Amino acid sequence: MLGQVVREQYHLLFQRAWSVWLAALLLGALNVFLFAFDRPWTASDGARNWGDWLLRGIGVIERGDLLAPWLYSGSVLNLGLLAGALASALLSRQFAIRVAPPGELAKGALGGLLMGVGAVLAFGCNIGGFFSATSALSLSGVAMMAGLGLGAFAGIRYLLWEVEHWPALSGGRSYTAGAAHGAGPGLQPWLGGALLAVLVVGLPWAYSRAGYVPQAGFLLFGVAFGVLFQRSRFCLVRAFREPFFTGEGDHTRAAALALTVSALGFAILKFTDLKDRGEWVFPGFWIGGLSGGLLFGIGMTLAGGCGAGSIWRAGEGHVKLWCAVAGFAVATSTARLALGSAGLLSKLGAAVFLPSVLGWGAAIGLVVALMATWYIAAAWNEQTRRLSAM
Amino acid sequence: MTGPASLERLDCRGLACPMPVLKLSRAIKAMDPGGVIELLATDPGVVADLEVFERRTGHQVVERSAAGGVYRFLVRRAR
């Protein structure tokens, strides 16, 4: 009897795709929990930590104060995301090392590089600079949203051109290894279950024993994001790209819902002074947000994954996204260094906290109205196909 | 009915989203109405992508299967 129940629940959780709406609601809520715990979610500062270590390793920078990747909060979140998605893919028998043709790997790396530069200009990736910044009622997040939309449009127009006029780029040999075979469950679910147990019990226990309790928390948040994304395939690239491609609006509407939930939670935390009102309000309105969003939007469309999407898909075994993550880490670290030393980071725009300008009610109303407009626009386009290529 | 002579194959193994759907979209445009194309892919996202493709374009997925990490679809071009 118990075995039957376990099999049924396993089937429900790891054989069937989760609803993107459920994922969106949970994503919005988890981002609020994460902000309440410490800081909002972003993928770029963790990637920058990885890039900084690389630059330090090859002697480009000297940073004695650089925190180890297993201790730096953003990096631990990313590692949790990667490993959580890996565990989830194994549990679902969907893990395989998928080596795309060379042209695709190059596109992944180029997309990652563009995302890295974009994330520096916009003070965060699409998660930190757009999703979390807009939730934090920062006008830079709205500027990045506009840039991401333009970038996704440019990116998908390029991809449509590419398959028409340069199909050889995505042709050529590809390899797949380690996929689950046979009708039975096989080894993957057992490996995934063991990895998940290590991630949610073993490592948090080890962190807290070593005195790093916050890191245990960041790891658990990252793992939750990884499982959530891998099972639902909820995708913020899709939210921006798909209206210009198939016209499908599900992920766009779900993203608008996720951001609304997240923004309401952030507003409560800030209004009640549980969190500092200036947190995650970036001096990127409008030049940094718009230009960074544009580059990031092109990059994420070429790579096929955003800051977070590249990392969780890397965990699922897509080598193209490994290239994207590597490019993202190197570029975000290098661009930050270059812009910082040129004194340009303070010239990317103003830090505008919407309630300071509009008052709390109008500021929250503006963000909710913006999300409602995005939602309705996606539904309208789905019906009319005015913006879509199909 | 479509005979095997009109069956084309599109190998998208190793490609990540959105490339399989982009390539399928281009390939199907070049086909005659009623023609069937076989799509092979390894990205798990292709399952949901093909549902959207079917809904948005009217082309019909007439057969779907998965084995050894390879997803196989037969897609018939709408008339």
Image (cartoon, rainbow, N blue to C red):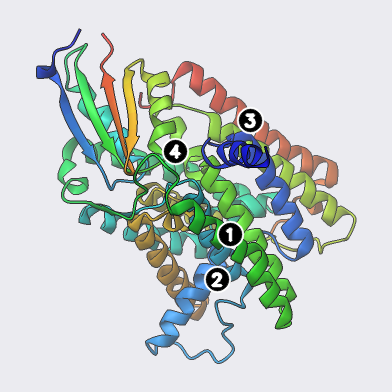
Residue A64 picture location, percent across and down: 55, 92
In this rendering, the answer to whether B59 lies above or below A262 is: above
Q: Distance between the residues labelled 3 and 2?
A: 31 Å
In this rendering, do the residues under marks 1 and 4 share a single chain? yes
Most foreground residue, A222 or A108: A222
Residue lying furthest right: A272
**Label 3: which residue?**
A373
Question: In which chain is the residue bearing label 3?
Answer: A
Residue mark closest to the camera, 3 vs 2:
3
Estimate the spatial distance between the alpha carbons at disc 4 and disc 2, rounded to whole Å.
29 Å
Discs 4 and 3 lie in a common subunit: yes
Secondary structure state at the residue bearing disc 1: helix
At a point 55% along the width and 61% down the height, the residue shown is A194
Badge 4 amino acid: Arg
Which residue is disc 4 drawn over?
Answer: A241
Tell me which corner region of the image, top left, top right, bottom left or bottom right, holds residue A371.
top right
N-terminal of the two: label 1 or label 3?
A: 1
Return the chain for callout 1: A
Label 2 CA crowd tier, 10 Å (few <14, some 14–19, many 20+): many
In the image, is A304 to the left or to the right of A384? left
Residue type at numbered disc 1: Leu
| Quarter the N terminus of chain A occupies | top right
- Give the CA separation, mark 4 to mark 3: 17 Å
